[in-house]
Image (cartoon, rainbow, N blue to C red):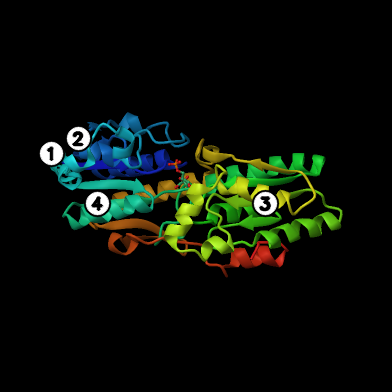
Amino acid sequence: MKRIGILTSGGDCQGLNASIRGVAKSLYEEFGDDVEIYGIKDGYKGLIFGEYKLMKPEDFSGILTLGGTILGTSRQPFKLMRVIDETSVDKVKNMKDTYKKIGLDCLVILGGNGTQKTANLLREEGLNVVSLPKTIDNDVWGTDMTFGFHSSVEIATEVIDCIHTTATSHGRIFCVEIMGHKVGWLPLYAGIAGGADVILIPEIPYDIDKVAKTLNNRIAKGKKFSILAVAEGAISKEEAAMKKKDFKKARADMKHPSIVYRIADELSTRVDNEIRVCVPGHFQRGGSPCAYDRVLSTRFGAAAAKLIREKKYGNMVGLVNGKIVPVPLSEVAGKLKTVPVDCEEVMAAKEIGISFGD
Ligand code: F6P
């Protein structure tokens, strides 16, 4: 009997259930009655505290289009639980104990960067693991695409589309905050797809005067409305030049709830037009996966089962040049796939006149 565990960790995204389904259905196809699948509850928290359940084939039916994760997920479980003193728990030992207690042959781990790092740690500790790259940020190293990204691009683009109609009607400027603290793939794609006039991403520090100039030029041409796609992690040139600790302090002292409000504020003294902010927030992570993500999740899930069949543990499943390939977790862990400032998407955006404020 094969025993396979599966967990989802970190921020949720569209396509988690589609991926879980892909893994489970492939395993049942492969091993029939000879496999047991254990769902670990709420990510690594369930592994640390031994919270899991034996799943049945019907648990994986009807979930292809379902948003979120049927297994639950968590970020920094200790922070959320508060009651537990983190230092009193040997997390790694507990995770290994749970793995052994269930008698797992392999643990399938679905998650973003932090999750991949922990997956690699478990690999180093001798556990058999296989991982899948999820996140709306598309910032996992070793894969051209993560599931969740395209669904999120669709939602963020629709937000910008809707803002466009009201912005043009009223001749207003809108700063739309798009998710992405460290990496700007999502604001870049949604900004291009939504026809934004300005895109501000963490990889390209902005000069507020240049941003204002773009907006004033548009006003001079008779276009009173403008749309800015602003990453959560947009950063000014002055901030980018700061030492990390000074930057952190400056952000902590900021009177605005997030950078998009500060940008709107700073623009209001430089541009003679009404400026509004729109924050779609977690809307971008919710709902059904788009068709692309359903297909990608299914391919990833099936590939994970294949790696288990072939006992090729210690790998993340990645998409490289259109092909599904195993990528060693040792190479993935601790890296971030940021937007190259001269990538084709940025260059094409610049060529059609979109400003990055640089
Ligand atoms: O990692 C995905 C993501 O949605 C980021 O784009 C965003 O910055 C972050 O998670 C928000 O995290 P949380 O849900 O913990 O607020």
Label 4 belongs to which residue? 129
Q: Badge 3: few (under 14), some or many (20 or more) residues near its Cα, within 10 Å?
A: some
What amino acid is labelled 1 in the image?
A: Lys
Label 3 belongs to which residue? 266
Query: Alpha-carbon distance for marks 3 and 4?
Result: 48 Å
Task: Answer left or right for 252 relative to 47.
Answer: right
Q: Nearer the viewer, mark 3 or mark 4?
A: 3
Marked residue nearer the N-terminal end (1 or 2): 2
Query: Alpha-carbon distance for marks 2 and 4?
Result: 17 Å
Q: Nearer the viewer, mark 1 or mark 3?
A: 3
Place of residue 152 in the rendered image (x, y in percent of width and height, measured from the top left): 54, 45
Determine whether label 1 and label 2 are within 8 Å by CB.
yes
Label 2 belongs to which residue? 50
- Which residue is found at the position 74% from the left and 54% from the top? 270
Label 1 belongs to which residue? 101
- Say the numbered circle drawn on residue 358: none
Q: Is mark 4 within 8 Å of ligand 1?
A: no
Query: Alpha-carbon distance for marks 4 and 1?
Result: 16 Å
Assign a secondary structure to mark 4. Answer: strand
Place of residue 32 in the rendered image (x, y in percent of width and height, measured from the top left): 24, 39
Marked residue nearer the N-terminal end (2 or 3): 2
Assign a secondary structure to mark 3. Answer: helix
Q: Nearer the viewer, mark 2 or mark 3?
A: 3
Determine whether label 2 and label 3 are within 8 Å by CB.
no
Query: Alpha-carbon distance for marks 1 and 2?
Result: 9 Å
What amino acid is labelled 4 in the image?
A: Val
